[in-house]
Image (spheres, rainbow, N blue to C red):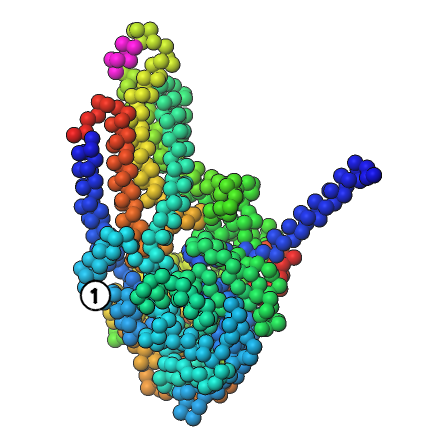
Amino acid sequence: MLSRHTLALGLGLMMTTALAGIASAQEKTLRIAMTAADIPRTLGQPDQGFEGNRFTGIPIYDSLVQWDLSKEKEPSVPIPGLATEWSVGEDKTKWTFKLRPGVKFHDGSPVNAAAVVWNVQKVLDKSAPHFDASQVGVTASRMPTLRSAKAIDDMTVELTTSEPDSFLPINITNLFMASPAHWEAKFKAASASDPAEKAKQAWTAFAADPSGSGPFKVTRFVPRERLELAANDAYWDEKRRPKIAKVVLIPLPEANARTAALLSGQVDWIEAPAPDAAAQIKSRGFKIYQNVQPHNWPWQLSFAEGSPWLDKRVRHAANLCINRSELKEALNGMMAEATATYEPGHPWYGNPTFKAKYDPAAGKKLMTEAGFSASKPLKVKVQTSASGSGQMQPLPMNEFVQQALKDCYFDVELDVVEWNTLFNSWRLGAKDPAARGSHATNVSFASMDPFFGMVRFSSTKAFPPVSNNWGYYGNAEIDKLIADARTTFDDKARDVALAKLHTRIVDDAPFVWIAHDVGPRAMSAKVKGVVQPQSWFIDIATMSMD
Amino acid sequence: MLVYLARRVVYTIPILLGVSLVCFALVHIAPGDPLVSVLPPDASAELQAQLRALYGFDQPYIVQFLRWLGRALQGDLGTSIASGRSVTTEVVTAVGYTLRIAVLATLIGFFFGSLFGFVAGYYRGSAMDRIASFVSVLGVSVPHYWLGMVLVIIFAAILGWLPPTGKGDESSLWESFRHMILPAVTMSVIPMGIVARTVRALVADILSQEFVVGLRAKGLTDAGIFRHVVKNAAPTALAVMGLQLGYLLGGSILIETVFSWPGTGFVLNNAIFQRDLPLLQGTILVLALFFVILNLLVDMLQTALDPRIQRS
């Protein structure tokens, strides 16, 4: 007969063990607060910029080529994903991709050439039953030359571009593979009779219950509130087989709300904590991770007739007169000093002769040579916004630069407009009335892809309104450098060609380079194995929790 | 009464039509592209034109408006450009969430507002009046988003008693309620201040009327007189409360953003920033509809409470 005490002790032990088990299970759930105001779209091609790719792209889906997110010290580079190898044909417009055998979507259907063709069609083939206009914008613009796909055999697919384009393998990191079989099932279950309406319903149903081949599967989706993911234990890449059983993604657009959520233990990880709260976050035992990102926060200069920036000495002077380390201090360290679009160490950096370091004496000398002085400053007008995606803290940062340049004989006028207005004006160019006579625009941008980092700002084919060469910078020589890079298909040789282009850009200084974002995120100390790569993305699959 | 009700319902139609027309015009006058959420700025001109045609934004404004209106009359508010979800579902869900905290905030605001108002009005000129008036002025004046942040810092970040954001796990009623407390208390401050000031003025006015002197002369106790004052002040206080509920339903953008509460304010805020035209128009239309219905209900309630108010 057990005594009362023994029984109580036994029950107590059992309860403690059970509670510890529950606690442990709870701890294996990683709760992440995103900056997005809604769950980024889950149907394969996420919205909400690269935060979408970070949280509802890469964890749920795979692409043919993916980013290497395993290194902190080196720039993130494209590596094989669902494709194990690829090559370009004789005419340089047909690419052959060999697919990884044995990969399955979360619904069990195979990832094969037909599935890849289907995924290209979803955004490029208007006649395809599953064509979805809502996914076109965020996809087609990121792979501007891709035109079609064809299955060569079950595990080989051919992609065709409109012109020779060696950037294609980088571009297609943005094309995520959704399961055709799962979509077909949703299509069959849709109630509408009109095929277009039925397809729309199928995509809506697919978004609520998606199927990719990534390391995490969607288990619950509540619009605007939460997305729950569970580990895909059958993931093809053993190194990326998740150690965390469950991930919960919560949209929290307000920085102070995110910080409070972390401090109160409501979440384990927040994106972009409020900069003022960094010290408090650290003092409460949380860790802040950051690393330089392929992001630029510059002034893009106008080369239109009458622009004060037409004089190269003035452009160099502005780059030399900004004490970027002081600006970094003002932002509590939450930026990296920008001296070019790509920094030394990056394969595309090259060997520019101009170095955008802090040297106000050299800057003043150049300004004096150009005919300006304290009593005769150069008037420049810069258009910026008070907020916006990737804009960091535009007003205090611009005021800092304004003050810094004042010492170098610049009289800077800031024209602050609403974010969407600035965004639209970016496309319309410096000569358009939307620029309101500005000589520079301050729109931040992603530069992980050579087209987005360099070509669209330096090609004469990218003059407004075609693309974002707002300042009309470019000439035949630069176009030739671009063409060389685009038609060089050996990866290393292409990098050399891109480095030549970057060298030319840095020497010409069509930008005042100021800052790179560092993607700060604060996490509980329980989250282990965090690698913050030099990328907009981060790999949750390789993390673990205590 | 029925004729009055029918007339009010008919009046609703031009109001809603006007609201939708003004909203449509304002959204199109404002700078920005309605496809900004699905079309990055680096998209080619060809792609822009292609998507504009696919979404029907290449059509003349009048055609776009009439198409939208035609669908709205059948209960279909379209599809959100940003999320691809049905606007009707989005708005109905959001209204449900806003209604929860708006009703709770109105109840808190009405209870404390009436309490402060009656006390201040009944004891006019006393220290209690000054305290109650100070609290009500504070309620009207304090920026509620600031108050929200302060409450979050105190009760969530420092004390850890209440969750700072979101709506919580709905499977637990208690957990759900805990998530409502901070936003509802923050939201209640304005109606509390307004109701308190209105009731104070009403009570002071009623107390100075002859019938109160008559009641006192008849020997009625203070409690009896208080009951008469309450009865006379109630219709106006209720009308104010109804209007406040209407304001709270549509005017909680800041609070819902601070607390990431997925209500109409949160949805509207996102729709504005993303230039999500169908969602913006749908939400405003539904809110306008709510406001009109609420006003109608308040008018009817007033009539029921005070037969002297004749509706003809």
* Chain holding disc 1: B
Question: Which is nearer the eye, A343 or A412?
Answer: A343
Magenta highlight: main SS: helix
Q: Is residue A3 visible?
A: yes
Q: Is residue A312 visible?
A: no
Q: Residues within 10 Å of mark 1 (few under 14, many from 20)?
A: few
- Image coordinates for residue B262, horizontal then vertical, percent: 41, 49
Question: Which is nearer the eye, A461 or B263?
Answer: B263
Kindly give the residue lying farthest to the bottom in the view shown. Answer: A90
Q: Is residue A218 above or below residue B233?
A: below
Question: Which is nearer the eye, B257 or A485?
Answer: B257
Of the 4 image quadrants, the one containing the N terminus of chain A is: top right
- Image coordinates for residue A376, horizontal then vertical, percent: 30, 67
- Residue B235 left/right relative to B109: left
User: What residue sits 31% from the left and 28% below the top?
Assistant: B237
User: What residue sits 54% from the left and 81% below the top?
Assistant: A84
Q: Does the magenta segment cover residue A18? A: no
User: What residue sits 22% from the left and 56% below the top?
Assistant: B70
- Residue A411 left/right relative to A494: left
User: What residue sits 39% from the left and 25% below the top?
Assistant: B115
- Image coordinates for residue A88, horizontal then vertical, percent: 45, 88
Kindly give the residue lying farthest to the right in the view shown. Answer: A1
Mark 1: which secondary structure? loop
* Residue bearing the label numbered 1: B59
Q: Does the magenta segment cover residue B211? A: yes
Of the 4 image quadrants, the one containing the C terminus of chain A is: bottom right
What's under tag 1, amino acid-wise? Gln
Tell me where the magenta segment starts and ends, as one range.
B209-215
- Image coordinates for residue A266, horizontal then vertical, percent: 54, 49
